[in-house]
Amino acid sequence: MQRRFFVYILANTKRGVLYVGVTSDITRRLAEHRSKLAPGFTIDYGVTHLVYVEEYASILEARAREHALKRWRRSWKFKLIESLNPEWRDLSDDLIL
């Protein structure tokens, strides 16, 4: 079975605080963010809504994309999110893994 890697963006509200991350297990990682067990950015800002996700076959590609997105302006991230998710819905229920 081929390994998959995900670059994702979480938000606390529409056009609110954003968090960009990378993982090989999106379901587990979302559960970790939402459980609020590990101290950090997502707990401090309540960033728990999955608003954007991309899939990659290579961890190197995924990390490169994560790094690039983290350097983007907020307005660019908003346009990216709204190009696929204009309502800023939480996409976690739509994941097919």
Image (cartoon, helix red, strand yellow):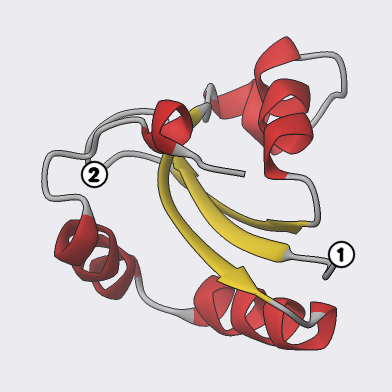
- For badge 1, the amino acid type reads Met
Assign a secondary structure to mark 2.
loop
Indicate which disc residue 1 carries. Answer: 1
Q: Which residue is mark 2?
A: 15
Q: Is residue 62 above or below residue 93?
A: below
Residue 9: image x %, image y %?
49, 52
Q: Which residue lies at the image location 78% right of the left edge and 31% below the top edge?
A: 28
- For badge 2, the amino acid type reads Arg
Residue 6: image x %, image y %?
65, 61
- Left or right of 54, for residue 59: right
- Left or right of 94, for residue 66: right
Q: Quadrant of the N terminus?
A: bottom right
* Cα separation between marks 1 and 2: 37 Å
Q: Which residue lies at the image location 17% right of the left edge and 58% below the top edge?
A: 82
- Left or right of 56, for residue 81: left
Please tell me in which quadrant of the rendered image residue 67 appears: bottom right
Q: Which residue lies at the image location 49% right of the left edge and 39% below the top edge?
A: 95
Seen from this angle, which residue lies furthest left? 86
Q: Which residue lies at the image location 87% right of the left edge and 23% below the top edge?
A: 38
Q: Nearer the viewer, residue 74 or 55?
A: 55
